[in-house]
Image (tube, rainbow, N blue to C red):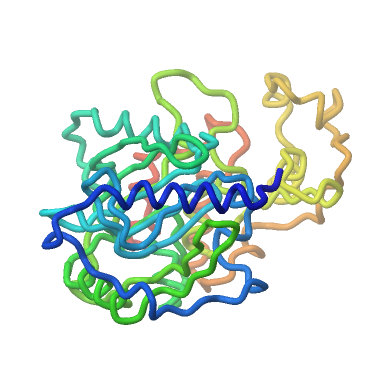
Amino acid sequence: MRYASPTRSMASYWHAIKSLVRQPDSQLVRFNNSNFKILPSDQQIEEEAYDSITKGRYYPVRIGDVIKERYQVVGKLGYGLGSTVWLANELRRNHVVLKVFTNDLQNREEINVNNHLMNVQSKHPGREHIRVALDAFSMQGPNGEHHCLVYEPMLESAQELLRRNPSDISGFNILLGIGDKSVLQKFVEAEKKSPSPRKDVRGYTVYASRAFDSPSGRSIGTPLLSDFGSAVSGDVEHDEDVQPNVYRAPEIWDLFEGKHLFYGNDQKEEKYMTRAHLADMTALMGPPPPELLKVGKRTAEFFDKDGGWIAEVPVPARTSLKESEENLEGSNKEAFLQFIRKMVQWCPEDRQTASQLLEDDWLNGRS
């Protein structure tokens, strides 16, 4: 469904209503709202790549807006299919990050998990390495209700840092803490001096995201795990898929090699499919043992009664961990592969536990 001119009128009307709520002038950052680059209409940027704009799913955040009479938006940090992320100045206090979700509730689980974490009292040493929201609220947009999570600002992900400063490791949902808070004010001053390029799409303003200054030394703080959209409760048993398709075990391979061990790309369907993932595993590990196939709930979809492969996609040519590993050599490589083999086993009982893996020679630099 596409919105015609009424969408533009609705968005404009909505911002006119919001402008009636005044804030004390001394608390607001003044932005230059005339000296910015207007991007051409045929140049697609950021969330414009998704159809959520034309469907009215994003909340129309604008730099300079004051949300909930408490948070003034001072710049855009990023975007995704289900949210946009902004640096904001909490009036009378500190900078925070606002993660504003779309109104289609596709990220409901992430919101639920964060609400749970906010209420958990724990002395576990890992607690300080989990990014927990400071606040959560909902607000009404021109096309529905939007949920918002408020966080302490973080630097880029470990993955982005390593993209700027290449190495052998890549990180995904690991964000780096901010040790030197001056990077936040520098971000605001940069936005004031050189406003972010933007464009209008049916009444919705799409901004180009702005990055913090490249971190180094004391500006990098404690790393935190973030983004819990695929998290599940550990209080109940799960036998369904509980991770994003390609971000499944062994995650440490992804971190160290900068690529997946199993992709699961189904050439026939042109997307991730379980059968393709199983085919990749079979090519690397050989066929699963009969005792595992006997207890599988979906075994008959992929294997015959003798353990032969019957799915509609072929098993790729046989490969090995040694052929797949590309960063190490000699004894260090062999030690790393021995570490990985302790995890990459068909039967759960054959895999080492997390506590056992922590004692591994390669992981502890004893290889």
Locate residue 283, reporting x and y percent. Answer: 75, 49
Examine the rendering and report whether any part of residue 68 can be seen.
yes
Q: Nearer the viewer, residue 357 or 218?
A: 218
Determine which quarter of the picture holds residue 178: bottom left
The residue at 62%/43% (across/down) is 245
Q: Nearer the viewer, residue 26 or 315?
A: 26
Left or right position of 132 against 62: left
Determine which quarter of the picture holds residue 213: bottom left
The residue at 58%/70% (across/down) is 326
Left or right position of 271 against 309: left
Determine which quarter of the picture holds residue 128: top left
Q: Nearer the viewer, residue 49 or 344?
A: 49
In the image, residue 92 sits, relative to residue 124, either above or below, namely below
Left or right position of 130 against 52: left
Q: Nearer the viewer, residue 208 or 262?
A: 208
Locate residue 12, reporting x and y percent. Answer: 48, 53
Q: Total label count? A: 0
In the image, residue 229 sits, relative to residue 7, either above or below, namely above
Locate residue 328, reporting x and y percent. Answer: 51, 71
The residue at 51%/66% (across/down) is 333
Examine the rendering and report whether any part of residue 341 can be seen.
no
Q: Image quadrant for the C terminus?
A: bottom left
Q: Image quadrant for the N terminus?
A: top right
Locate residue 288, reporting x and y percent. Answer: 71, 35
